[in-house]
Amino acid sequence: MNLRKLFAGWTFRTNKPAYAAGDELTAFVTGYEGGVAKVRIGDTIIELPDAESGLGDRLVRLRVTEFDADDATGRGELLGVVEN
């Protein structure tokens, strides 16, 4: 059996995905720290300073405004809440 062919195209996901300014994402607000909403994707944390309170565990759309790949942290702007 040729294992190289069997595993061709396979990739592993990282627990610290990286983003660039302008990337748009859909993710859950996982909580607040110091009154600032936090979105966690794996070990990556994106703050949403303009998000209102009460969005915990809600699915939101956001645009990344800045990102530090070394720390896997960033900031974003809330685009809207995804309705169920």
Image: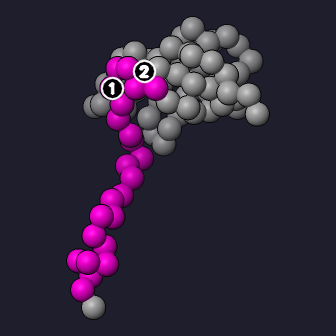
Occupied quadrant, residue 56: top right
- The answer to the question of whether label 2 and label 1 lie on touching residues, with beta carbons closer than 8 A, is yes
Residue at 63% from the left image edge and 18% from the top image edge: 80
Residue at 55% from the left image edge and 32% from the top image edge: 26
Which disc is residue 64 wearing? 2
The residue wearing badge 1 is: 20
Give the magenta range: 2-24
Residue at 36% from the left image edge and 58% from the top image edge: 12
Q: Residues within 10 Å of mark 1 (few under 14, many from 20)?
A: some
Q: What residue type is disc 2 on? A: Val
Occupied quadrant, residue 48: top right
Which disc is residue 68 wearing? none
Residue at 74% from the left image edge and 28% from the top image edge: 83
Q: Secondary structure at mark 1?
A: loop
Residue 16 point in image, percent of width and height: 39, 41
Please check the rendered image and state whether residue 23 is part of the magenta-colored stretch, yes or no. Answer: yes
Residue 21 point in image, percent of width and height: 35, 20
